[in-house]
Amino acid sequence: MEPKFKLPTETVTLPSKGLLYPKDNPLSKGEIEMSYMSAKHEDILTNMNFIKNGTVIDKLLQELIVTPINYNDLLVGDKNALLFAARILGYGKEYEIQFYNTALKQLDNYTVDLTELKEKEIDESLFTPGSNEVAFTLPHSKNEITFKILTHGDERAIESELKGLKKIHPDKSFDVTTRLKYLITSVEGKRDRKDIREFVDTYLTAQDSRALRDYYAKVMPDIDTVITIDKDGYVQEGVDIPIGISFFWPNTGA
């Protein structure tokens, strides 16, 4: 039965181009259909339970996505693209931010046109279509590894593990090593999770850890949120767009 009314939709392209998803995954098409934000969706944004437990944005995106997908499969960079698309479809392209004006030596305001943001330039030859795995040689130890681009599901698993570790060891931090254990998919051909965890805990040097994280940031498909501000003849490069409370609540102030 056809609905009485229709909510308009838009097709959003994914920074990954769908290359890293299995061929039978709808995300492999490299695009997602999203609906415009409605009054019902604004109810999600004001749900205090969602806000308190940090799930409000995920709840919103899941409601806006029309294409039948498994939300946990979304690569983090692709999810970021949907985040910006949702903001544009809901409240328009103009987003006012505050930045530190180096000439005035004080905070200043600037209105960003979100539609002008570009996808990061990535080397697609590094990816094998249908496979989320990238090869890398650790520069210090020369160990050959492969790693994956993290998904929303991976991020949830990392967050859950970190919470458990924090309860057991409240005075210690495991952020870097835990993330690397999910990131790395093989070391010298060994794919057993036990071997990977042992490698990260015992054999991965700080130099190699830094090199891997830097390379990951370089090759990860995502939206480029670093902009150049040109205001009243003043130009400032390398300003990262902050995602503040006004991103989805534009009338509440930054």
Image: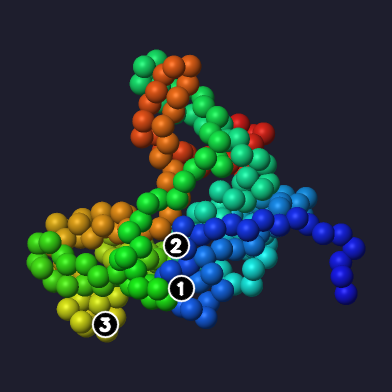
In percent of width and height, residue 136 lies at 21, 67
Quarter placement of the N terminus: bottom right
Tell me which amino acid carries mark 2.
Ser
Q: Residue at x 44, y 62 (%)?
A: 16
Question: What secondary structure is marked by label 1?
Answer: loop
Location of residue 193 (image quadrant):
bottom left
- Please give the residue where the numbered disc 2 appears in the rendered image: 16
- Marks 3, 1: nearer the viewer: 1
Query: For the residues marked 3 and 1, what is the alpha-carbon distance in whole angstroms?
Result: 20 Å
In percent of width and height, residue 53 lies at 56, 57
Colour style of the rendered protein structure: rainbow
168 vs 151, left or right, is left
- Please give the residue where the numbered disc 3 appears in the rendered image: 191
Q: Are marks 3 and 1 in contact (CB under 8 Å)?
A: no
- Please give the residue where the numbered disc 1 appears in the rendered image: 21
Quarter placement of the C terminus: top right
Q: Are marks 2 and 1 in contact (CB under 8 Å)?
A: yes
In percent of width and height, residue 158 lies at 40, 66
Q: Residue furthest right?
A: 4
23 vs 140, left or right, is right
Question: What secondary structure is marked by label 2?
Answer: loop
Query: For the residues marked 2 and 1, what is the alpha-carbon distance in whole angstroms?
Result: 9 Å
* Label 2 crowd bin: few (<14), some (14–19), many (20+), radius 10 Å: many
Tell me which amino acid carries mark 1.
Tyr
Label annotation for residue 235: none
Question: What secondary structure is marked by label 3?
Answer: loop
Tell me which amino acid carries mark 3.
Arg
Location of residue 99 (image quadrant):
top left
